[in-house]
Image (cartoon, helix red, strand yellow):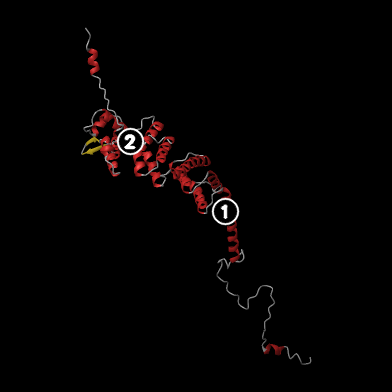
Amino acid sequence: MKSSKGKEDISRLLVNDSLLPDIFLVRYAQELSRNALLVYLWINMTGKKGGFEESDVRKFKIIPEEEISAALAELMSAGLINRKDKIFSFDDIKAREVGEYIEAVKARGEDPMLTGVMSDEKERKVLADSISSTFYQGELPYIFYRLIDKCLYEYKFDGRVCYKLFEEGYEQSKHRSLQQMEKMALSWYEKGYTDIKSLEKQLEVNKRTQKLIKLTGSLLRRRLNGLDIERVTGWAEDLDATEELVTQAFKENEFRGNITLKNVGDTLTKWHDLGIKTVEEAIRAGEEEHQENKRKATRKKANSGSVWRTGEEAGIGNDKKAEPAPAEKAAGDTVKEDISIPDDILDMFGDSDEDD
């Protein structure tokens, strides 16, 4: 007789197969903080989809208590859970996604009942299949079909531009993040890179940007942060800066004790406004500027007269010393004065004309 103990033990095992949809993985999971991700997964695993409170999360002790409120707020901000009074509930992200898709199809003037969620015209299907097999091992998440539709029908991308979008995302390891892919697609659209010809310039700028980031980090001898990278990207995109011009711009600022990216950027901006595209032109412009500064200094000197100025010209000692009285003369001067001798004194000596 077989014991039923083993069967009873197995029946006590709780195996939850709450499979998370690919929509969560590609649209939300990669953007969530560790705390928010843990809370969402644990609540999902325990089957509390009908509703839960903050106290339920506290019982799990999976994250510090003081960080629970922030994690729940992040999940609400992401659109993954809702709150009514003290009760939290999961949002149906699959239903919401399908609803958004149907609205997008209607906006194109098509019948969503005839089009279908995962099918479209032949050209679109060939493009999607190619993207799936090349960059997703044949398993393209549904939500990226939505991105393909957006690129083709809303942004009016050429099919080759749409394919390049996923190629660039793959090379930059962004192809698994819907947010980053959408951000790149929007950037291309806003800059007008909707056909393959205009896109080639953007791709060239992207490659040049990466080279400038590496070069700038080497010249500064430090790792660039996010703000630094944004500034260097501007050099490539807005100023058409090359590696040679950036190197020369650093040399132009060597006289400074501490070269900053703003110093280099100001120099590159000045050259861009002057239409300078080569190092030779930059050097020549620098020499001409130096000569012009010398000419200005010379003209200024000529206009102001002698370089050396008297104290009175310089505004020093304006108080004039009073003129000395006529009787006051410098030491050593001969002084002649008309002295009158009284007559009675003269009579004592007699007339000088009389005989002795």
Name which residue lies at 57% across and 53% down: 285
Type of the residue with mark 2 = Ile
Q: Around disc 1, counting alpha carbons within 10 Å, would you say few (fewer than 14), some (14 to 19), or many (20 or more)?
A: some
Residue 285 circle label:
1
Q: Is residue 96 visible?
A: no
Q: Is residue 347 above or below residue 138?
A: below
Nearer the observer, disc 1 or disc 2?
2
Residue 239 circle label:
none
Q: Around disc 2, counting alpha carbons within 10 Å, would you say few (fewer than 14), some (14 to 19), or many (20 or more)?
A: some
Name the outermost residue toward the right. 356
Quick one: 46 or 66, which is closer to the camera? 46
Whole-percent x, y for residue 294 in the image: 60, 58
Q: How many marks?
A: 2
Determine the secondary structure under disc 2.
Answer: helix
Q: CA distance from mark 1 to mark 2?
A: 53 Å
Determine the secondary structure under disc 1.
Answer: helix
Whole-percent x, y for residue 63 in the image: 31, 31
Q: Is residue 210 above or below residue 349?
A: above
- Going by the image, does 97 lie left or right of 280? left
Q: Is residue 262 above or below residue 25?
A: below
- Going by the image, does 248 lie left or right of 78? right
Report the quarter where the C terminus lies.
Answer: bottom right
Residue 126 sits in quarter: top left
Whole-percent x, y for residue 56 in the image: 24, 31
Whole-percent x, y for residue 31 in the image: 35, 36
Q: Which residue is mark 2?
A: 143
Quick one: 30 or 324, which is closer to the camera? 30
Type of the residue with mark 1 = Ala
- Going by the image, does 60 lie left or right of 275? left
Name the outermost residue toward the bottom. 354
- Going by the image, does 231 lie left or right of 319? left
Could you tell which of marks 1 and 2 lies nearer the N-terminus? 2
